[in-house]
Amino acid sequence: MQTAAPIPFDNSYARLPERFHARLEPKSVAKPSLIALNEQLAESLRLNSQWLRSADGVAMLAGNHVPPGAEPLAMAYAGQQFGHWSPQLGDGRALLLGEVIGEDGRRHDIQLKGSGPTPFSRQGDGRSWLGPVLREYIVSEAMHALGVPTTRALAAVATGESVMREQVLPGAVFARVARAHLRVGTFQYFAIRSDVDALEKLADYAIQRLYPQAQSAADLLAAVIEAQAKLVARWMSLGFIHGVMNTDNVSIAGETIDYGPCAFMDAYHANRVFSSIDEGGRYAYSNQPKVAHWNLVQFAQALLPLLGETEEAQIAAAQKAVDRFPATYEAESARLMNAKLGLASSQEGDSQLVGDLLAIMQDEQADFTLTFRRLGSDRFRGEFLDLARIDSWLERWHERVQAEGVSEADLAERLRCANPAFIARNHRVEETIAAALKDDLEPFHRLNRALQNPFIDQPDDADLMLAPEPNQVVRYTFCGT
Ligand code: AMP
Ligand code: MG
């Protein structure tokens, strides 16, 4: 017997005017089978995990069945990709199924990625292969466990079909949850068309859904700038490199979105790049705050018609908002980096202390995650060869910690809570993908499990914590299609 409406969809985006999206059904796949279901997330969205695991549930997650209440649509958006303007991108391999209200009282999108071609597909096939689906699953859930705002992984389903990339690979569909799939590029799509009516409706929608305290487009702009500044500060504090910070990949909700060739750094280097297509290093680690600022300037530009009566007033309002980015970022970054050193207060000289440690780490190619994790323990010095140099830094750090008046036990606890043991290491992610290609999903599930508690030492999974051996290092990640 089939239940009437297994998912209580309530689709606000589908109620926006037709030009915001293209309605279409996902394209069925040959033989869907469930790879992973995030039951905790499902419950928090009031979804029935048992139903999601059923034949109908898996069929929905694969795009083979559109359940009652779902209104699948591809969202329209534009964007600057590596600085090059594209007036029309849109969901080329994704469909928004609909929205649900979670236990948190908030509205959440359920989107299928890899669900077949749409009017926005251009040359693409609308599909995904297994690798990027598993990568996004692992990394987005790891980010969530690390306390970073992010889209979430609801499920991964194998399609039983092949997709053609550089080679023939198994296909998969990823079910993703977001507070909203609104992007800077969504606003740009209407701005470039001088569709002020749509811009107004979109801004009102974003305010209502994400920033109800905002009274105006200027407030919305300020809220998004703050959310993005804090988000990128979090990435930086974890050595995370997004890899494709195009304006279509910048979420208005302030969540990390569109995990492609992303990675966490192992050995620290300020200019680290992973993406195989980022030849100029536009989205290198240390460029991320600058790029985020640039992306938000594009957002402000798209909002201009809503920011005042005259052009002068509009530009002044936009400028004022974007000028707040650097200070907001710096303050959040200082707070997070200080926390990594066990410091709850801030003093002059702290950023020098942080910067000097990073400089030593860079010269010594020290592992970003383990170095911080081992600060305060005997193992810390083991990360370095030039002991005189690190000892002199340690002396300054001890002196600074004294000023906090914190007990040794509390300091250890502070350090443990600010510095994860586990990140989604690139070589481990690649390993799980390689195993999955041989039908072995155990490494995927194991890695995923360990990453759910990144701040807790997990002796059984200690190998997943370690930096790669020289022969295990993965230098490049490929674009997530
Ligand atoms: P992303 O890499 O997710 O930021 O995607 C950039 C743009 O390329 C978006 O408009 C996607 O919908 C589109 N795209 C990426 N891969 C595919 C694909 N396999 N088929 C169709 N469109 C795609
Ligand atoms: Mg994208």
Image (spheres, rainbow, N blue to C red):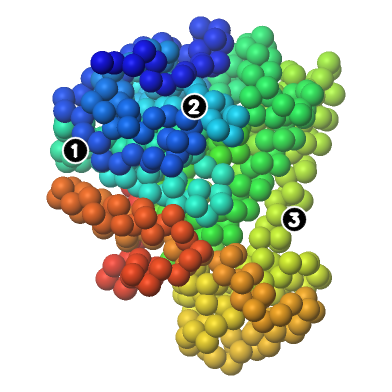
* On-image quarter of the N terminus: top left
Judge the density around disc 3: few (<14), some (14-19), many (≥20) Cα neighbours within 10 Å: some
Q: Return the residue at label 3.
A: 331
The location of residue 237, given as percent across then percent down, is: 59, 60
Q: Return the residue at label 2.
A: 109
Mark 2–mark 3 Cα distance, whole angstroms, equals 31 Å
Going by the picture, which residue comes out furthest to the front? 1
Q: Return the residue at label 1.
A: 170
Q: Is residue 64 left or right of residue 370?
A: left
Quarter of the figure with residue 117? top left
Q: Is residue 86 above or below residue 168?
A: above
Disc 2 versus disc 3: nearer the observer: 2
* On-image quarter of the C terminus: top left
Residue flagged by tag 2: what amino acid is it?
Asp
SS for dot 1: strand
Disc 1 versus disc 2: nearer the observer: 2
Sequence-wise, the earlier of marks 1 and 2 is 2
Mark 1–mark 2 Cα distance, whole angstroms, equals 26 Å
Sequence-wise, the earlier of marks 3 and 1 is 1
Sequence-wise, the earlier of marks 2 and 3 is 2
